[in-house]
Image (spheres, grey):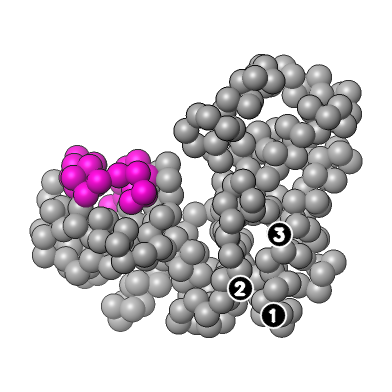
Amino acid sequence: MICVADSGSTKTDWRVVDLENEARIDFHTIGLNPFFVSENLIAQTVAEAKPDSIGEQVEAVYFYGAGCSSPRRNVVIEKGLRGVFPNARIEVYHDLLGAARACCQHSEGIASILGTGSNSCHYNGEEIVDNVTNLGYVLGDEGSGGHIGKELIRARSYREMPKEIEADFDVTFTYEHEDVLQSVYHNPLPNRFLASFAPFCGKHRDHPFMQGVLRHVFKSFVTKHLLKYDAADLPHHFLGSIAQEFEPELAQVLKEHGLTIGTVIKKPIELLTQFHREAHGI
């Protein structure tokens, strides 16, 4: 048996596969970001969520997670999982490598994440060889749900939102101005708060104003990140809820910059499992 996990800051998708009979078990836990969880909490969370019978049968665990960007942080995940899968080889990787392996498999390409936040990399078919710096939700995260949220909040606050959109915005979001500032500057997880406005953009996606917002955020991502790889001949793959929801608008912006869109998926667990099944010769 092998176990593959894809962990964001809010949720982790787990898939256990029996390589002999193709049986599959899926389960879910909270996000296990080593910035925020201890090894004891990891062990307790996974032990409570997994089926009782599989712990000792798993021979390898492949964990891809947000925040898993250094050996010091990755060891927190490894130690936590060791208590649940005592006989397994445990490998912990950054979620960006998970996106690249899922979308590109063993081929060269540019892999990007467009979800709550954003990130990108040049993958050579085996490893990440280049990564334009990710500055996070305050200074960066271009093209993300958080970026869309910031544009909508700005437009409403600066009286730049069309009246028909503004009316529905005020009904949908009943925050006072002070509530928004509190959520962005003082409350936990401001990136998720900002990204929570993105579905409103989808609701009105055909309106010229929203088309302008989408064009702006995706153009920012393309010019500040993708064009820096100087890889117009490579396919550009995307992972995440924003990429999937707004694929037509994203593809159009890429086309205008001479880039070709490749695979677009919301979650990587299926393709990551395929990657590791093939690595085991299945």
Amino acid type at mark 3: Phe
Instruction: Give the side of residue 26 with respect to residue 264, left or right.
Output: left
Q: Quadrant of residue 168?
A: top right
Q: Under tag 2, what secondary structure?
A: strand
Q: Quadrant of residue 276?
A: bottom left
Residue at mark 1 to residue at mark 3: CA–CA distance: 15 Å
Residue at mark 3 to residue at mark 2: CA–CA distance: 13 Å
Quarter of the picture holding the N terminus:
bottom left
| Crowding at mark 3 (Cα within 10 Å: few <14, some 14-19, many 20+) | many
Q: Which residue is mark 2?
A: 110
Q: Is residue 93 above or below residue 250?
A: below
Q: Mark 3 vs mark 2: which is more N-terminal?
A: 2
Q: Are marks 2 and 1 in contact (CB under 8 Å)?
A: yes
Q: Is residue 199 above or below residue 70?
A: above
Q: Under tag 3, what secondary structure?
A: helix
Say whether residue 213 is magenta.
no
Q: Which residue is mark 3?
A: 221
Instruction: Give the side of residue 112 with respect to residue 5, left or right.
Output: right
Q: Under tag 1, what secondary structure?
A: loop
Q: Which residue is mark 1?
A: 231
Looking at the picture, how far across and down is residue 216, in whole percent?
80, 51
**Chain part drawn in magenta:** 25-50
Residue at mark 2 to residue at mark 1: CA–CA distance: 8 Å
Looking at the picture, how far across and down is residue 87, in whole percent?
11, 65
Q: Are marks 1 and 3 in contact (CB under 8 Å)?
A: no
Q: Are marks 3 and 2 in contact (CB under 8 Å)?
A: no
